[in-house]
Image (tube, helix red, strand yellow):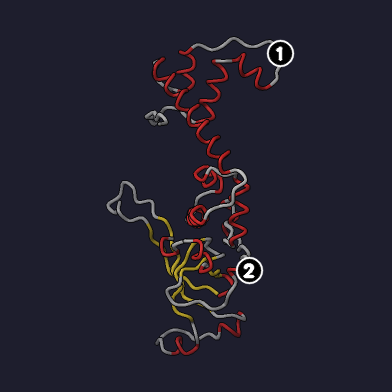
Amino acid sequence: MRKTVKKKDYENLTAANIEKVIALLNPDTSAQATGESKSTPKAITKKEACDILNIAYNTTRLAAIISGHLEQKEYVRSRKAKKRGTAATNEEIAEAVTDYLQGDTITDISKRLFRSAGFVRALLEKVGVPQRPSGKDERKEVNYFPDECVSENFNEGEIAWSAVYHSAIKVGKRLTIEYQDSKPGLKTVDYESKYGCPCYQIYVIQKVDSEDTFFASVTSGGFNAYSAAYELGKLEHLRKYGVKLEAL
């Protein structure tokens, strides 16, 4: 069983920082691993190691942190080695697709699946998952859809994807001329003639960070909008991999 070490908020126990401490505690080993031929610097003390990690001076805890890190590193290496060269299972596909569409990064998903980031990226492209922009400034851009997502026809209540909001959406009413005429005060527009495709009411689904509020149990919210069909992507084809679209 792998050891776990409780971490305080102010402690710097990132993998990169622990690796740094290990290298500084064992400069001879680090120099051999990197092939450096220069004179090896003096090893730091355990007190200095604790200072770098921003933990109280405790050699037993320091040893536990390093041991736990090395065990986790070996565990990840062995899991990756076992999966290397094997095809993704439907369970992996469903997890990768769901997590990605809910906003997780490819890097985070790859760590959970013990796969490379390139493997996950290729997997998402292969099964036809809409791509999200990578930077904050790019969130205003409209992304193109994979062929599997392209459609003009959506059913009321269907879960789809918005290329404008880069989010899962719930499809509402199709704004046909007949529907608009039935709504007093609503200006009638022939969207199919104007845009060359139907227009739909949509509800944009968003995650809610409700921690430390009166609504701590609320995890999702959103807002109403309108969208032309060419800005919407179908997700129904992802169900065959076990993706539960309603969970988005």
Q: Which residue is mark 1?
A: 38
Q: Label 2 crowding class (10 Å Cα cut-off): few <14, some 14-19, many 20+?
A: few
Q: What is the C-alpha distance between the residues marked 2 and 1?
A: 56 Å
Residue 173, position as x, y percentages in the image: 44, 79
What amino acid does circle 2 point to? Asp
Residue 185, position as x, y percentages in the image: 41, 85
Residue 35, by quadrant, is top right
Is residue 55 found left or right of 76 in the rendered image?
Answer: left
Is residue 90 found left or right of 6 in the rendered image?
Answer: right
Which numbered disc covers residue 215? none
Quarter of the figure with the N terminus: top left
Q: Which residue is mark 2?
A: 147
| Residue furthest to the left | 214
Q: Secondary structure at mark 2?
A: helix
Of residues 168 and 245, the one drawn nearer to the viewer in this rendering: 245
| Residue furthest to the right | 37
Q: Label 1 crowding class (10 Å Cα cut-off): few <14, some 14-19, many 20+?
A: few
